[in-house]
Image: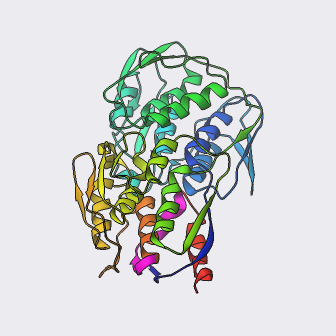
Amino acid sequence: MERIEPLAPRGFFQYKLPPSKSHMIRQLMLASKAIQVTEIRFEGTPGEDIISMSNCLEKMGVNIEKYPDKWKVYPPKDGLIPPNETLYCGNSGTVAKIMTAISANFDREINIDGDASLRSRSNAILSSSLRKLGCQISSDGFPCIVRGPINPTDIEIDASESSQPITALILSSTDFKKKMKLTIHGKEVSRGYLQLTTNIAKQWGLDTEFIDNSITLTNWEVKTPDIVQIPSEMSLYPMAILLDNLHEKLQVEVETQDIDELLLDTLEVLENPDITKVNLRDGSDVITPAAALMAISEGGEIIGASHTKGKETDRIIRTCELLEKFSLDCIPKSDGLILSGGSYPTKPESPIETHMDHRLAMTAVILATYCGAEIKNTEIIKVTHPDFMQMINSLKLLQP
């Protein structure tokens, strides 16, 4: 339980972002299959989701030397090996899906598991796809037992809930024995993350791309780029905007490294104080701080976020629950939220449940800096931003 006291900070405050987990997880995966050693550079502290990825790869024969500002990845000489123990993916759905697809290339049973939050999430789309490709998958969730190998054949995948299954298949295609045409159907969401996957893979040697929602995948040689620099985790930028907007006399400056353009359009919208409607079809990760921002400003509507129900929690319902605890009006919809606006948070009467969702927890902590609160399970924040609580506690130094 974390007790946050109300603060009235003033002056300049440096908000430091961690390295992007979306980028680093993908880069680590490809570095583990490269033909030479890769040096991955970054600023800030990698979160526990990134650590989960590295732990899984180390169980498959990869050696990773970890320094404060870079990791050196030594791929196994003869390729990844099937692990002798469970691949524990922690809280990360991205890691779990990627490791499921990678494991499906082996003709051996491999166990994949994670924490309680991961166990509550579905992996049905990827599991169904892998079964169509000849694999045995014991469950549509986690834990699960995977046995391949993949027998590539043309396949269609529904991308209306998540792009992660497609990312997983693209990253595992380096080991395919023949060509496979993958076609997307359904109303695609999180398109920026899928574009990120293909852009990074092309930097490492992938020589194909999507044409009319289809991509042809076959085995390809993974070649290390000259420089692998991880940008800042820009999906956490709205947290800094929220902190700045809550405290009138505080000026928050965000320290970024090699700015990631993945969410720039969404972030530019959120920086507009007069915004009354936000479409999060491609930016679902920011729904909770975005809703808090709109609740303390003019209010409005969030749309295009139905796929957030399959995240660490049902973020539509849990975001409303969180805001209402702070006396901020919120109405859930099937694909988003309606915020009344015009209010500032008041101290909750009971401890805040974060449901082991790091973005809910961070938003709750920031709201509590204005009015105070007791918040459960703030340790979950470390999956993305290990330095967050220390940084927030440093606001006490800016008290008058």
Q: Furthest-top residue in view? A: 179
Residue 371 within the magenta-colored segment of the rendering: yes
Instruction: Specify whether residue 357 is in view.
Output: no
Residue 211: within the magenta? no
Please determine whether, in this image, residue 97 is positioned above or below residue 315. Answer: above
**In this orientation, which residue lies closer to the viewer: 359 or 10?**
10
Is the residue 214 above or below the residue 262 in the image?
above
User: Residue placed farthest to the bottom in the image?
Assistant: 400
Quadrant placement of the N terminus: bottom left
Instruction: Give the farthest residue toward the front.
Output: 274
Quarter of the C terminus within the rendering = bottom right
Q: 354 above or below 263?
A: below
Residue occupying the point 63% across, 71% down = 12
Q: Is residue 159 visible?
A: yes
Q: Is residue 179 above or below residue 305?
A: above
Q: x and y percent of residue 2 in the render? A: 46, 78
Residue at 32 percent across and 73 percent down: it is 326
- Residue 186 image position (x, y, % from top left): 31, 27
Percent from the top left, x then y, of residue 231? 64, 46
Please provide the residue range marked out in magenta: 370-383
Which residue shows up at 54% across the image and 32% down it? 197
Image point 45% across, 70% down: which residue? Answer: 246
